[in-house]
Amino acid sequence: MKLEKKWNKKLLNKKSVSLMLSYVILIVIAITMAIAVYAWLRIVANVKPVESCEEETSMILDSYKCVNENLKLFFRNNGRFSIDGFILFVGSDTEKIPTSLLIPLNAEQLSKEGYFIFKEFEKPEELGPEPIEEEDDGITGGAVLDAEEDVLVPGETEEAIFSNRERKQDGGIGKVNFDYIRNIKIQLFIIHEESGDKILCENIIRQELKNCKINE
């Protein structure tokens, strides 16, 4: 009887170990298959990893001015990483999400309403003893400026100027249909070095404006 009990106990122990090994093997096979399927899908579907801004990418609105039917915004990069630009949405009702996209004045992409890309502007050097004849481009008020790509680096400040004009449904450009800007939303973005795509950041600035008359 004692020998039979010992033999049965050994058999039960062996069965328990075998069962545990079976579970472990099944889990390993499942994980391996999942990795293989994911790798295959990436190749077939050309799945790319999700791009995003660094966690501490941040910018604040130091102040603003509403003069001569223009909106001037003064920003400071208070984060740890550079910022390429932002998208500005404006509105006339603080109870609603701002949706109007104004056309920027001191940005390179003047035809892209709402978008502002930080640039470093430099006046062209004079050639020869005679000064260069200045040409009025209607925006800079005199000299034609040469734009070089730049970013808003941590600790630096920058000014962005927007007109009171927007693109209408018919494709034309005209003044916004409200006199006061009462709230704004600013969406930061960076530009991918290789593809040139704009990558939106989680940092969004929302602010109400006071006495900001955009139409005289």
Image: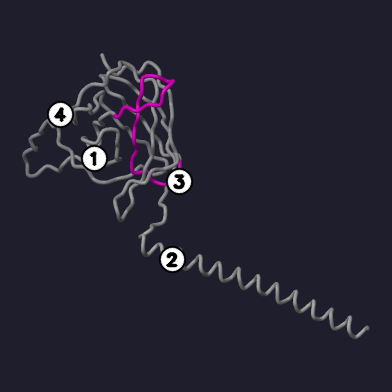
Measure the C-alpha gap from mark 4 to mark 3.
36 Å
Judge by depth and name the residue closer to the eye, 98 or 214: 98
Q: Are marks 2 and 1 in contact (CB under 8 Å)?
A: no
Q: Earlier in the sequence, mark 2 or mark 1?
A: 2
Element type at mark 2: helix
The residue pinned by badge 1 equals 121
Give residue 134's quadrant in the image. top left
Tag 2: amino acid: Ala
The image position of residue 178, as x and y in percent, is: 30, 17
Asked if residue 86 lies left or right of residue 55, the reply is left
Q: Earlier in the sequence, mark 2 or mark 4?
A: 2
The residue pinned by badge 3 equals 80
Judge whether residue 99 is colored magenta. yes
Asked if residue 101 lies left or right of residue 7, the reply is left
The image position of residue 135, as x and y in percent, is: 10, 33
Measure the C-alpha gap from mark 2 to mark 4.
54 Å
Q: Earlier in the sequence, mark 1 or mark 4?
A: 1
The image position of residue 73, as x and y in percent, is: 34, 29
Give the extent of the magenta segment.
79-101
Q: Are marks 2 and 4 in contact (CB under 8 Å)?
A: no
Q: Nearer the viewer, mark 1 or mark 4?
A: 4
Measure the C-alpha gap from mark 1 to mark 4.
16 Å
Q: Nearer the viewer, mark 2 or mark 1?
A: 2
Give residue 38's quadrant in the image. bottom left
Q: Nearer the viewer, mark 3 or mark 1?
A: 3
Which residue is pictured at 24% across the width and 31% down the height? Answer: 105
Checking the image for residue 138, the label placed there is 4
Which residue is pictured at 8% across the width and 37% down the height? Answer: 131
Name the residue furthest right.
Answer: 1
Which residue is pictured at 9% across the width and 44% down the height? Answer: 127
Principal secondary structure, stretch drawn in magenta: loop
